Amino acid sequence: MTEHTEDPAADIAWMRRLAEEGAEAPVKGGSILMAAGLIYGAASLFEWARVTDRLGEIAGTTGVAWLVATVLFLVILTIVNLRLRGRAGVMTSANRAFAAAWTAVGFGIFALFTALMINDYRMGPDQGFTAMWLVPSIIFAFYGLGWAVTAAMLRSGRLWLLAVASLAACPALALLTGSASQYLAYAAALFLLMALPGYLLMRAARA
């Protein structure tokens, strides 16, 4: 029988190392956040243009933009992950925690999005898929949590502002439910609160 022995000193040392690495070493993976913001922001702009008849009569395109965006993002995600793994250097504890946090955010969004689709399907077409209008708010709730964890790891006040702004975007986007303006606001939030910070993190890591 194996006896588990707790070592508080080792735990404290690990937490201190995580904090030091987070403060000194830039995190990898900012390009993934930038790609997510740009791709889904562009898809939201496409949906806005479609529902406001700026693209003319394009039959059968409802929801296709999100599917295309997801496939494209998964391809880019795979490529970036392979490149990051192939680079020389030690994977710091901060980078492992960063990757774990945002991976959990991604799976959480996927799980809730699937649940909403199932709910709308079971409720029938008469309800008009109203639950799906909450997807932007739900996504930014997850993004707020992701930025909060990242801010805590890097001890960054600016990233805490991103976390607060992302959480504030949840009710703001809900106020636009049912209007074409929600697509524009969602795209703007993705560009400003996801793509731009992702780019800045990526640039810091390269520097």
Image: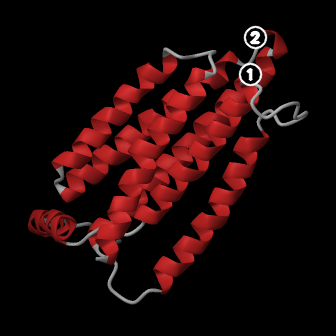
Q: Residue at x 83, y 16 (%)?
A: 125
From the viewer's perspective, is 113 left or right of 7? right
Q: Residue at x 73, y 43 (%)?
A: 65
SS under mark 2: helix
From the viewer's perspective, is 89 left or right of 129? left
* Residue 50 found in image quarter: top right
Q: Which residue is drawn at 32% across and 34% down?
A: 165
* Residue 187 found in image quarter: top right
Rendering coords of residue 10 (x, y %): 14, 70
Rendering coords of residue 36 (x, y %): 54, 53
Quarter of the picture holding the N terminus: bottom left
Which residue corresponds to mark 1? Answer: 120
Q: Give the mark nearer the N terminus: 1 vs 2.
A: 1
How many dots with numbers? 2
Which residue corresponds to mark 2? Answer: 127
Kind of residue at disc 2: Gln
Verify CB contact (< 8 Å) between mark 1 and mark 2.
Answer: yes
Q: Farthest left residue?
A: 9
Rendering coords of residue 182 (x, y %): 56, 24
- Vertical order, 92 against 192 (above or below): below
